[in-house]
Image (spheres, helix red, strand yellow):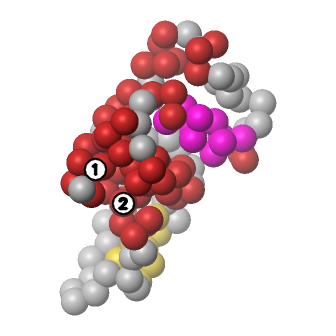
Amino acid sequence: MGLRCTLLGGAVLITSRGCTLGALNYIDDIAQRIKREVPSHLLPEGDTDLLFRMYAVLALSLGEETDVANVHDAWSAWMSQSDPGHESIEPFDKLSEDVRDQDEPFAEAIRKVAVGLR
């Protein structure tokens, strides 16, 4: 069951905490585009607003060159806030292949959105 917000004639920011009326800034706009590209069953639980804003920065700064290690670093910074002892907060090259592969759908989403930013 997903969150659904509708507003006629205005902008709605859909966050993990609910809907906010008003104009989207460019970072939130890109973050939402990236989030829509990720299959919903792969989205982390909890408040992911900051995580996807960080992914938006990757789209803007690295664009189509964003790789899974970049995604993992952003995720690690985000996860450090809520669970600093999480077992996957390790340098990317020290992770198992299975854990590394979990970052690929997010990297693909960031690259896809970055193409549209040109």
Which residue in the rendered view is the most extreme toward the right? 85
Q: Quadrant of residue 106?
A: top left
The C terminus: image quadrant: bottom left
Residue in view at x 39 percent, y 76 percent: 24
**Number of marks in the rendered image:** 2
Can you tell which mark lies on residue 34?
A: none
- Disc 2: which residue: 30
State the CA–CA distance, disc 1 to disc 2: 7 Å
Q: Which residues are drawn in magenta? A: 71-80
Q: Are marks 1 and 2 in contact (CB under 8 Å)?
A: yes
- The image quarter containing residue 12 is bottom left
Q: Nearer the viewer, residue 82 or 5?
A: 82
In the depicted structure, whether residue 50 falls above or below residue 67: below
Crowding at dot 2, Cα within 10 Å, few <14 / some 14-19 / many 20+, comes out as: many
Residue that label 1 marks: 113
Q: Position of residue 36 (x, y in %)?
A: 30, 51
72 lies left or right of 109: right
